Amino acid sequence: MKILTAEEIEAHHYHTLSGGVKGAVAGVIISGLIFKLAPLRFPAFRPAKMPWSLKTAMFITPPTLLTSICAEEASTAFEQQMYGSNATTNAAVEDHRRWKQLPWSEKLIEGVSSNKYKIIVAAWAASLYGSWKLVDRDPIMTKTQKAVQARMYAQTVTVVLLLGSIGLSMYEEKQHPDARRLEESRRWEKVLERAEEEEANAKKAGKRTNEDRVNAKIFK
């Protein structure tokens, strides 16, 4: 049985909480889409006429479900990263320790950089919906013209976000010019460490007697 250190417990808690927060955000978005778009597709579905207890239950179900699922998945992924067959000894703990030492500005930049494509896709979808709601107020344009206009607005926002992501990458490269080299060096260190562990285990297994090998087998 492995005794967990305080850092391992803290890192596991952080990964689990992060997964739960992501699931909660996704669940709230899904609930909002259900209450907003479902009545348009199914006119019989009218949340405004439902009792508040039923509306509350319907609204909190997706966030609650996704929070538990994403938190469990994040916890399992952390355990696999720490204790899986291909895991290095303290990779997850070292990454969490490095993250804790970063200032809030660097955490924000790194978080945005790590999720920039998700942010771009989400912003594109939100801008497409928002621009459609804005253009749809025009009583003169046809539906086709409104769709084209809304798409142009959304594409403009997407181009701006892509340029921003390029600028962010250039800023990170300027702030940390040796980041790629250090990451490559760290990756090779992990490979060598894993090879040394496998070699040590092989030597240890080679020193066992036949009686030890027989006793180590599990017969069902």
Image (cartoon, rainbow, N blue to C red):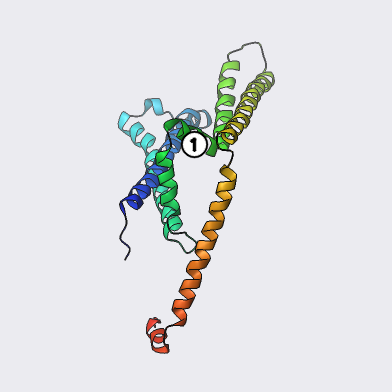
Name the image quarter holding the C terminus. bottom left
Residue farthest to the front, as pictured: 178
Question: Where residue 4 sits: x, y (%)?
Answer: 32, 57
Q: Position of residue 160 (x, y in %)?
A: 62, 24
Residue 176, quarter of the rendered image: top right
State the residue in front, 144 or 213: 213
- Is 169 on the left-hand or right-hand side of 219? right
**Residue at 35% of width from left, 52% of height from top?**
8
Viewer-closest of 153 and 77: 77
Q: Residue at x 45, y 47 (%)?
A: 95
Residue at the image point whose x is 30% and y is 60% from the top: 3
Residue found at x 45% / y 53%: 91
Q: Position of residue 198 (x, y in %)?
A: 50, 70
Residue 178 in sight here:
yes
Task: Give the residue pinned by disc 1.
Answer: 111
- Residue occupying the far bottom of the picture: 210
Is 134 drawn above or below residue 166 in the view shown?
above
Residue 220 seen anywhere in this rendered image of the structure: no
Say what amino acid the circle numbered 1 marks: Gly
Bin the neighbour count of mark 1 within 10 Å (Cα to Cα): few under 14, some 14-19, many 20 and up: few
Q: Quadrant of residue 116?
A: top right
The residue closer to the viewer here, 50 or 93, is: 93
